Image (cartoon, rainbow, N blue to C red):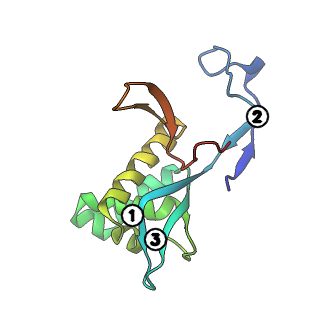
Amino acid sequence: MQRVIATRPSSEGADVAGAPSSADDGVMRTEFAFELPRGYVGSDGTVHRRGVMRLATARDELLPLYDARVQENPAYTTVVLLGRVITSLGSLGPIDASVVENMFASDVAFLQDFYRRVNAEGHTRIAVTCPECSHRFTADLAGGRLGES
């Protein structure tokens, strides 16, 4: 489900700072699968939970600033931006701001965090602590299930 682009490895397998890069396998992920906590309810009553978000471009972040809805209410920036970078959601056709504005608030909050992780941090993993035993581990927000690879 992810689209990848082959990239030329950095010099001698080092990252920008010069330290060895263990993740540099010559492939850059540009799309990330996700699963909404609640799901978007379509006009026919179907619940859509699985989707794909692509990496944002500078254009994606700039164009909402020219949108009249954003100029009237800056909080609408998130809605327009997510409508641009979500490439699919369930069996829905094209995703746009009207789909995002009709999502449950908890799903929009999830997508905002997912967007930040993908675009700023480059991954979808989060640190988690078990409330019962205090064991610390990582979980993947991209919707992987236990036992899946």
Residue that protrudes farthest toward the top in the picture: 19
The local secondary structure at tag 3 comes to: loop
Residue type, label 3: Asp
Q: Nearer the viewer, residue 127 or 73?
A: 127
Residue 113 image offset from top left, x and y in percent: 40, 46
Residue 32 image offset from top left, x and y in percent: 58, 50
Give the quadrant of the C terminus: top right
The disc label shown at residue 80, or none = 1
Q: Which residue is mark 2?
A: 26
At horizontal 71% and vertical 48% (from top left) the residue drawn is: 4
Spatial CA distance of label 3 from label 2 is: 32 Å
Q: Nearer the viewer, residue 9 or 53?
A: 53
Q: Say which label, 3 or 1, has the lower sequence index.
A: 1
Q: Nearer the viewer, residue 65 or 77?
A: 77
Q: Which residue is mark 3?
A: 96
Spatial CA distance of label 2 from label 1 is: 32 Å
At horizontal 71% and vertical 28% (from top left) the residue drawn is: 24
Label 2 Cα crowd, 10 Å radius (few <14 / some 14-19 / many 20+): few
